[in-house]
Image (cartoon, rainbow, N blue to C red):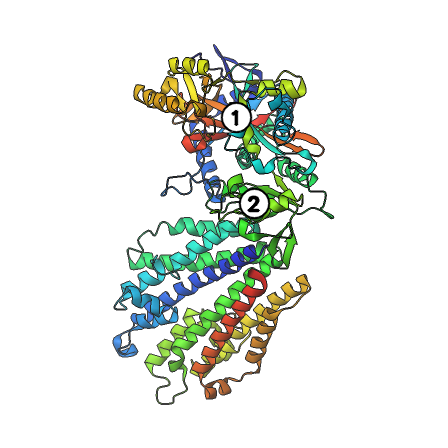
Amino acid sequence: MATAFDEMNIGSGGVRLPYDQLFRWLNEQPQDALDYRRREAELIFRRIGITFAVYGEAEAQERLIPFDVIPRILAAAEWQKIERGLTQRVKALNMLISDIYGAREILRAGVIPDDMVFRNPAFRPEMNGQKVPHGLYVPIAGIDLVRVDADTFYVLEDNARTPSGVSYMLENREIMLRLFPELFARHRVTPVENYPDVLLETLTSIAPHTTAGEPTVVLLTPGVYNSAYYEHSFLADKLGIELVEGRDLFVRNEVVYMRTTTGPRRVDVIYRRIDDDFLDPLAFRPDSALGVPGLMSAYQAGNVTLANAVGTGIADDKAIYSYMPAVMQFYLGEEPLLKNVPTWRCREDDHLVYVLDHLDELVVKEVHGSGGYGMLVGPTASKIAIEQFRAKLKAAPDNFIAQPTLALSTCPTCIEGGIAPRHVDLRPYVLTGRRGTRIVPGGLTRVALKEGSLVVNSSQGGGTKDTWVLDN
Amino acid sequence: MLSRTADNLYWLSRYVERAEYLARIIEATQRLTALPLAYVGETNEWEGAIATAGCAAAFAEHHKEATESAVIDFLAFSRDNPSSIRSCLEQARSNARAVRTALTMEMWDSINGMWLELRRYGDGATSREELARFLRWVQESSLRYDGSAYRTMLRNDAYWFSRVGVYVERADNTARILDVKYHVLLPDNERVGGPLDYFQWSAILRSVSALTSYHWVYRDNLKPWLIADLLIMREEMPRSLASCYEAIVRNLDAIGNAYGRVGPAQRKARSIRTGLQNSKIDAVFQRGLHEFIGGFIRDNNQLNNAINQQFLS
């Protein structure tokens, strides 16, 4: 594995331009000043209640995601490249999903094998031939990017289902503004605080055609026990919309209503943070207590917009991901502006042979997995772990893909007793409404706090940073 | 506004109010038991505390005898008692979490702060001093919550529902104190003025934070019928039944005006208030204080049910 690209230091004391002021400022700070503010930040987070739940840890029901006070900085030109690439990619994702549930031209052309779609657990036959309002399936996308050198960002993962984490993008900035006003005085940082406004505009713009007057938008949460509950309530608050649970909604004559103190009120757009499976016990999992009976019937009648649409999870699949360059070529006739990480599909025999031979150098992931669970990072795994994984892989090769172990870029990060480089990724949030795509400059930077670790997921010891996009 | 949100706000206020009331009962009882036996007689004040808190049946399920430590633990820290101070504060926090968007930052701060602090008292208080600190802290937290609601909330239905919760709970608490102690308030000439009664009366007033008010209102020694008058009829006494119902009617009317519709809850509240306004304390005693209070507690519960049906479900 090559040495990682550091976003601040270029070696022998040199500093990359966007980090110029930050570098000077860091050198002026006594170490205990940073420590002090780090503790202060933690106190504020705890006080506001920005916590998340880790599944399977009963005693630590509410934990803080560690926050690193050193920002990650992108120059305006770098961001513009990213922005164009994301817009292109989300356009293709939307066309792909629309096609899969529509004419299926991409399957007939043989670009993606049929069974990869039809045997995919995220594929929803209920959506076949189903029109969605304004033809928009993925109004909210979170695209995970990693950087390997000064010029190259790879797309690591598409999140077209219910991408989370945007509350950290907003809160991290608020905390930074409170803790380091003098640092902001030295930079021109593009604001992110308008994200809720853009999101609300996006959601109201895709209300169903049957809506009379100003559409009523709600955010549907699984409830307080969900790991992202804080984010749900935070966003509902910032958007000024009701935060509803399944039991607050009901369906009558294929129209969705919420129960209010003044009686039933019609709901037009549901920003749902609940998986397809749990949306409607009549259509999907009958044992789900989180959903709304009859919601799918209202959806199919075109009386309510779900954002994102049902069945978009197919694009999160890591095997489908591996076809994205071809998908973009097929619909747009364009080369991807943001590259895919080279990916081996273990379902293909020659790929599998290669992967089995190189397990100790590759990252192997489950195609339907998320959150960093169930993956193998070859170079850091023990011999035993590799052999155990080999057996799993051989038993069900269709379930896995493999990628080279990328040298993710590093950023300076506060650690016990100093500052050291740690690996980071970036998740920008891409909003697409009736009037086009908008991306608030920045996103969520996740950082692997353990030395050498490449796993940035918060469930596995990752932290977050504020992400700055500089104005020219 | 979502019915569930209104329900959560209403109960959030009730839980905080109840926690404060429990802290007051424990404090008042401690004072009574600290008196020499000659002054108080052979009664078990801790049994009285359990009865005043309205959880005699639940207590009997877990304890044989109402000892000081058993009662304090049950009322303050027990997880078995759904109405202990700890349970109230935990439910308040969980309600608050469910309706964060309806709370102001200051309200959330006070509830969340309470909950964080509560965790310091894992297995209860280790000493009398610590218990005293705990009880003071509970009362201060309740004041802080109440004050932050009063000073920072928008005057809309969210505010009104949370206020109604405070006063329905407060009315219930005041009524319960009167109900348990009604026997010492009876105008029985033989016993009036004895040291036992005197300290019982002042304990009652203390538990509703009304001892000083009493003297300001009546400029007289503690007299049982005046105490009853203060806690039932006097609108200027913030914990009296009359005052609670003045506030309940006012807040339910605000909701009615905003929604352009008046229903069973508003009518019930109004009729209870009129009943209180038309009563005279002499008549109450003639009819029987115990019966009067019992009737009030039933009415108050019916109002709770009417609110629930009209708005919260």
Q: SS for tag 2? A: strand
Q: Amino acid at mark 1?
A: Asp
Q: Amino acid at mark 2?
A: Leu
Q: Answer with left or right where residue A459 lies relative to residue B304.
A: left
* Residue A309 in sight from this viewpoint: no
Q: Answer with left or right where residue B212 lies relative to residue A154.
A: left
Quarter of the rendering containing residue A107: top right
The crowd level at tag 1 (other Cα within 10 Å; few <14, some 14-19, many 20+) is few
Residue A196 coordinates in the image, percent (x, y): 62, 38
Where is A322 relative to B110, above or below? above
Q: Residue at x 63, y 69 (%)?
A: B263
Q: Quadrant of the C terminus of chain B?
A: bottom right
Residue A464 coordinates in the image, percent (x, y): 49, 30
Between A106 and A375, the one nearer to me in the picture: A106
**Residue A115's mark?**
1
Where is A146 relative to B40, above or below? above
Q: Label 2 is found on which chain of the structure? A: A
Q: SS for tag 1? A: helix
**Residue A220's mark?**
2
Q: Residue at x 49, y 80 (%)?
A: B229
**Furthest residue toward top:** A12
Where is B309 relative to A332, above or below? below
Quarter of the rendering containing residue B275: bottom right
**Residue A270's mark?**
none
User: Marks 1 and 2, Cα distance to the nearest angstrom?
Assistant: 32 Å
The crowd level at tag 2 (other Cα within 10 Å; few <14, some 14-19, many 20+) is many
